[in-house]
Each structure stands twice: as C-alpha cells, then as structure tokens.
Image (cartoon, rainbow, N blue to C red):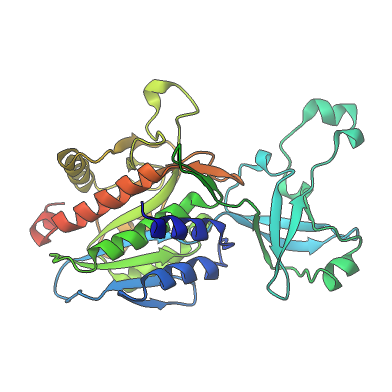
Amino acid sequence: MTERELQLIESLSNAPAPSGFEDESIALVRAALEDICDITEDSLRNLYIARRRNTGGRPLLMLDAHGDEVGFMIHSIKPAGTLRFVNLGGWNRGTLPGTRVLVRNRRGEWIPGVIAAKPPHFMSAEEKARQAVPEYKDLVIDVGARSAEEAEQAFGIRIGEPAVPAARFEYDAARDVMHGKAFDCRIGCAALAEVMRRLADEDLAVDVVGVISSQEEVGERGCSVAVEKVDPDIAIVFEGCPADDTFGEPYAQQTVLKRGPMLRFMDVSVICNPRFQRFVLDLAEEKNIPVQASVREGGGNNAAVIQQKMKGAPSVVLGIPVRYIHTPDCLTSGADYDAAVTLAVETVKALNEEIIRGF
C-alpha cells in the first residue's frame, strides 16, 4: 500500500456521503482517476470509469464498489431544538447513543452534534434495569440548539439533510490497523480505483468499466441502474464485509482480519457463480495470494443485482474484512486491502472470452 493509496483511503473514509448523498465520495474517486480513465456520472450519483484501452467487441468486465455509507437523514426538529432522524441503511442501533455525528446544514456546512443518550441520573429504576436498545423514533441528535427556532436559524438545520458519524480515520502503521468510519464500502472504492490504475496500460483480453455505485445500503438501487447502462458480461464486486473473528466459534470463522479478502459462495441475496468463484480461489492459490472463502447466512450486496439482470453476468465478491461494520467506528487492515487489489488485477489479466464462456 503506497502513500498515495493510503491518502485516498483516508479521504474516502472521512468523506461524509451516506446513501443518496454520495457527491463527496465519488468526487474523490473521479479526482484519483481522471488522468487515466474516461469518467462520467448519472443523476443517481453512479460514477462510471472506463479504461481508455477498451476496444469494444470483447467481453466487458464490470468492477463495482458502492460509494455510499450507512447514515441518517433529518426527519424533523423538536421544540427543544433536538433533531429527529431516520436511518439510511441498517445500523447496529445499540451503538448509536452517545455517538458524535456531523449534520449538514442549509449552507452546506457539516456541524457537530451527538446522538443523545439519556443520563442515568434521569432514568427510572425500570429504565436502568431494562437498558433496551432504543428505537430510531426515540433517538435524537443534539447540535446544541435550545429551541426549534434557534436550530433552524442559527444552526441552519432543515429537514431532509444528511448526517454521518464524526469518526476520523487513523492508521496504526506499526500494527497495520486502520480505524475509521465507512469502510463499507470506501475500502472497496479505494481498491477499485487502484485496480483501474494498475490495469491502465495492461494488454487485456477484456474491456473494463468500473462503477462506484450509489444507494447500496438502502437496497442496491444505484447498481440496478448501472448494470443496465454498462451491460457487463462478467463482474467483480468489491465490498467491505463484516469480519467474524471476534464473534462465534473459531471453526466457523470465515472472514478473519489479515487473512486476505473473503469470497462468498452465497449470502441471503445471491449464490455467486460457483465456477467463477472456484476460478478466482484457484488463481489465488496459484499466485500465493491470501484469500478466504465463506458461506454467509446473512447480508447482501450488488453481485445479486448484476447476476440477476441483463445477461446474468457471472459475479464474485471480493470482501475486505471490516470489524464492527455498520457501527460508527470500524477497523480494517492494509494487508487485506493489498491482497484484494492484487487478486483482482490477476483475475482480470487471466480472463478471456473462452474462459468466461465456461462460467
């Protein structure tokens, strides 16, 4: 992982860009690749990245990573000046009370706030005993306003604006641990960008288009549009996927930090093409690239959309392990990012029309 790559990962992790508001994340990828790729975007904030050596008349491989993150949207302003919000994507709600957040105001400023946590001093004995996970309707964001009028006028708050966790990226280089928000799927966005850069001058047997897709966390909406525009013959989907190495029995751990990307045979949304899956796993073994395989009992991703639309393009998912996914602060590793990039590059270089027909 070069300093250039690390800087892009940091910028992407820090970018406030929840579902529907992906402008800042896709702007970073555009800036990173516009010198070597042809780039366009649509009104859903899907970013299309075409390799300049594409010729047409060859199988088209789509690389995908989603540019959104789980976040919030302001629902209303309460009389005391606190902000009701709704979720954008599936949070672990128990981690939210006490979380510092940033809220965008009408002037485009991201102002600090906190998801209110009721102090124990004001809890009844029943509340202290119960300590239930709160519903979204019972949570508010406090930016320090004392009334709805002050929230609207002095703070510039208005309904429909996004909010995200305020966690900032840090890299513990000595132990190769990255801390930050939005590694689902900004670590995948960074990997896709680096793969496009490494393939820029390669002689390939396939054409390549990368997509930073929007609104994955609310139902794979952007990819549903992008796959029809790109019309791929085959696809590799990058994900930041939930690491399972701090939960459950060791024998069942399939997404362990620092053991390489995870290729899933299935989750609740898709059974990845088993022939393409085995091709990539065998290639990783041949090239001595660390990799993990899994059978997931939950989750979902854009491979389901790609594989079920248009041509039924065979798809695999390169999931970079992320601890504590869909919480305000997560952990991931540079080693797993490096392995995902290397494996994706080697896979694209190995593909040709005959091999793809065999999938």
The percent coordinates of residue 214 (x first, y second) are 48, 65
Q: Is residue 62 visible?
A: no
The percent coordinates of residue 336 (x first, y second) are 36, 43
Displayed quadrant of residue 163: bottom right
Q: In this rendering, would 234 be left or right of 227?
A: left
Residue, far left: 354
Q: Using the image, determine if residue 99 lies above or below residue 49.
A: above
Residue at 45% across, 60% down: 8
Q: Using the image, determine if residue 17 lies above or below residue 338.
A: below
The percent coordinates of residue 190 (x first, y second) are 40, 58
Q: In this rendering, would 308 be left or right of 200?
A: right
The percent coordinates of residue 144 (x first, y second) are 85, 58
Q: How many marks?
A: 0
Displayed quadrant of residue 345: bottom left
Q: In this rendering, would 44 be left or right of 109?
A: left
Residue at 64% across, 53% down: 165
Displayed quadrant of residue 112: bottom right
Q: Is residue 216 visible?
A: yes
Instruction: Give the camera-side residue of 254 and 101.
Output: 101
Residue at 69% across, 54% down: 101
